[in-house]
Amino acid sequence: MQTLHLHANDADLARAAGLLQSGDLVAFPTETVYGLGADARNGKAVASVYEAKGRPSFNPLIVHVPDVASAQKYVMWNETAQLLADQFWPGALTIVLPLREGHGLSSLVTAGLETLAIRVPNHPTAQRLLELANAPIAAPSANPSGRISPTTAQHVLDGLFGKIAAVLDDGACTVGLESTILGLAPDVALLRHGGVAVETIEKMLSVGLSQETPKTITAPGQMESHYAPNEVVRLNVSSAMSDELFLGFGPMQCDLNLSENADLIVAAANLFDHLHQLDKIGKPIAIAPIPQTGLGRAINDRLRRAAAPR
């Protein structure tokens, strides 16, 4: 298969939407990372997502829709969902709610669970594609399962060329981390750190949230080994060993720096791209400490999984 490299113009957007409607796979940009899109109602298309990524079938997918009204077609909406949507949608927050009867989605999307992870992305190209396709789009990150997430179209092509129909290129992702995931069935539970800082959610809801560690996978991004480079990753170090590359944070000597000014927003946006760059060199990677506050909690979550035994 020849993977098309499309761009964010009217003709290519229409072509990408047509491919999705035909059951093909199209990678597209969101503010978080590039997603690998398939019509969530088309079981064959969704199965192709798992095949292209090499993703375990027990790992559910996030469905992307253009607005709240569209989300309400597929899940049992509640007051907390509305509060969160009013504050954070469109944006880097995914909520997990019980499926609505007659939802029409492939059971592969939810990995057989009775709940659905759903999000309204805050990216103009993603929004236009969703509207043109006129379909709920299941879209995990557009990379081989367990590897570094893609924040540019080139990252997608490096990992999935020949396995998907097209990638829709609209530059680098601005947030650079996958969405935060909250379970709302029935109580609010943090299922994954991500692009919305947990402190912001806690302040808005007046609740404290700690990340759940369920015995079985209940939402995307809960695999213990994930986001991994090819080489070994060593965390929370002040300097690299002679055979290692050093990914820094703040003012320091290193091979690449997530943010010389110790800005966590900048660090989040740079994280996956810098890991891709270092991974191409083919040496182990040592990484400086990242503060465990704000987006630093999501960055450390990704790094911990990247360094986990495989």
Image: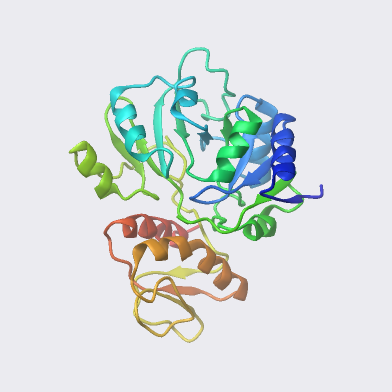
Left or right: residue 218 compared with residue 108: left
- The front one of 87 and 116 is 87
Q: Residue at (54%, 52%) from the top-left corner?
A: 146
**Number of residue marks:** 0
Q: Which residue in the rendered view is the most extreme toward the front?
A: 10
**In the image, is residue 44 above or below residue 292?**
above
Q: Is residue 124 visible?
A: yes
Which colour scheme appears in the figure? rainbow
Q: Which residue in the rendered view is the most extreme toward the top?
A: 102
Q: Position of residue 35 (x, y in %)?
A: 58, 45
Would you identify the image quadrant in which residue 13 lies?
Answer: top right
Q: Position of residue 84 (x, y in %)?
A: 32, 34
Would you identify the image quadrant in which residue 164 lies?
Answer: top right
Q: Residue at (57%, 50%) from the top-left corner?
A: 34
Q: Position of residue 186 (x, y in %)?
A: 29, 25
**In the image, is residue 41 above or below residue 86?**
above
Would you identify the image quadrant in which residue 216 lies?
Answer: top left
**In the image, is residue 143 above or below residue 18?**
below
Q: Is residue 139 visible?
A: no
Q: Position of residue 269 (x, y in %)?
A: 46, 61
Left or right: residue 5 compared with residue 271: right
Q: Residue at (61%, 76%) from the top-left corner?
A: 281
Left or right: residue 211 compared with residue 168: left
